[in-house]
Image (spheres, rainbow, N blue to C red):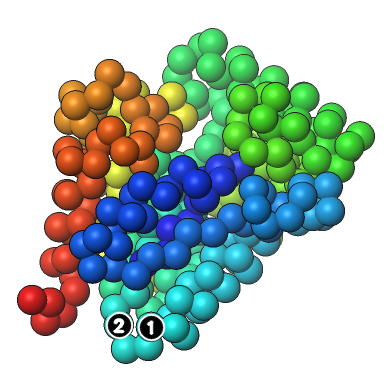
């Protein structure tokens, strides 16, 4: 199992979930994209794009694990950006299945809550790009968007967020063709109080997987037994006993000859 992180989210968020999967018989890798967390400073990696994370880092992590556990079925969990990468087929060639949590077409105008839409629009269209051009990175921690990010990644994110179809409207991505080549089983998880990955965003995004077997699940805070979950809450230890077993069971069903 490889866990592919969300944008500007350090691997430490996924430690509890990784430990849970390990306790249930999986070998698990978490890692940081280059320029995030423990994988180098955003300033030194200022020229990295978001597509570089998806097209280089994600397949490299998958290949690293596959080489160390040859002959075992390979799985992945992608959170937000990590799930987007998998939808495009990155690191998905040999997967027996993958889980995408809160992955969506991240269009700023589609954020339904007005206050959050204004905040995200200011960050992604004004403050973030300005900092990226002046500093070579975006101080995402101060902006409330997670870890600091390489400047070019922020600029690419800003451009995609303006397009109605996100990177599916970027001709250089060839995204629709790539998504159509994915044929594995997919579990797409949404969280009802996520202000970004709403059902209106998730549905059309996974609609591009025209040749995959996609199962959709939407969890509420009540399902998790917690007051709130939001964009990050599925990976908090507070839902370990309520939600994580459902993902474990979905994965177990796709492991051949498991006793």
Quarter of the figure with residue 68: bottom left
Residue that label 2 marks: 72
The answer to whether residue 206 shows anywhere in this view is no
Question: Going by the picture, which residue comes out furthest to the bottom?
Answer: 71
Q: Residue at x 91, y 34 (%)?
A: 134
Q: Is residue 246 left or right of residue 231?
A: left
Q: Nearer the viewer, residue 217 or 69?
A: 69
The answer to whether residue 32 shows anywhere in this view is yes
Quarter of the figure with residue 172: bottom right
Residue 176: x, y in percent? 49, 60
Q: Residue at x 19, y 26 (%)?
A: 225
Q: Secondary structure at mark 2?
A: loop
Residue 146: x, y in percent? 60, 34
Residue 43: x, y in percent? 83, 47
Count of marks, rendered view: 2
Query: Is 108 drawn above or below residue 215 in the view shown?
Result: above
Point out the image quarter for the N terminus: bottom left
Q: Are marks 2 and 1 in contact (CB under 8 Å)?
A: yes
Q: Is residue 86 left or right of residue 210?
A: right
| Mark 2 surroundings: few (<14), some (14-19) or many (≥20) residues within 10 A | few
Query: Is 199 drawn above or below residue 118 in the view shown?
Result: below
Residue 44: x, y in percent? 84, 53
Question: Going by the picture, which residue comes out furthest to the top?
Answer: 115
Q: Is residue 13 left or right of residue 98?
A: right
Q: Secondary structure at mark 1?
A: loop
Distance from the alpha carbon under mark 2 to that under mark 1 = 6 Å
Q: Residue at x 49, y 24 (%)?
A: 111
Point out the image quarter for the C terminus: bottom left
| Mark 1 surroundings: few (<14), some (14-19) or many (≥20) residues within 10 A | few
Q: Is residue 154 left or right of residue 33?
A: right
Residue that label 1 marks: 69
């Amino acid at each position: 199992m490889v866990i592919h992180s969300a944008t500007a989210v350090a691997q430490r968020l996924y430690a509890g979930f990784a430990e849970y999967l390990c306790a249930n018989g999986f070998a698990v890798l978490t890692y940081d994209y280059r320029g995030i967390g423990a994988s180098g400073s955003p300033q030194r990696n200022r020229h990295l794009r978001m597509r570089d994370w998806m097209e280089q880092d994600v397949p490299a992590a998958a290949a690293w694990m596959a080489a160390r556990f040859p002959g075992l079925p390979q799985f992945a969990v992608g959170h937000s950006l990590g799930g987007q990468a998998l939808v495009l087929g990155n690191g998905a060639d040999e997967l027996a299945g993958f889980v995408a949590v809160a992955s969506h077409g991240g269009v700023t105008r589609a954020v339904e809550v007005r206050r959050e839409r204004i905040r995200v629009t200011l960050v992604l269209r004004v403050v973030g790009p300005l900092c990226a051009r002046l500093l070579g990175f975006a101080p995402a921690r101060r902006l409330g968007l997670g870890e600091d990010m390489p400047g070019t990644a922020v600029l690419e994110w800003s451009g995609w967020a303006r397009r109605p179809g996100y990177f599916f409207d970027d001709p250089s991505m060839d995204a629709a063709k790539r998504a159509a080549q994915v044929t594995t089983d997919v579990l797409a998880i949404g969280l009802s109080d996520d202000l970004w990955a709403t059902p209106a965003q998730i549905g059309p995004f996974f609609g591009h997987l025209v040749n995959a077997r996609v199962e959709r699940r939407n969890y509420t805070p009540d399902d998790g037994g917690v007051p709130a979950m939001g964009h990050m809450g599925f990976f908090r230890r507070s839902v370990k006993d309520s939600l994580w077993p459902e993902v474990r069971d979905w994965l177990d069903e796709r492991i051949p000859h498991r006793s």
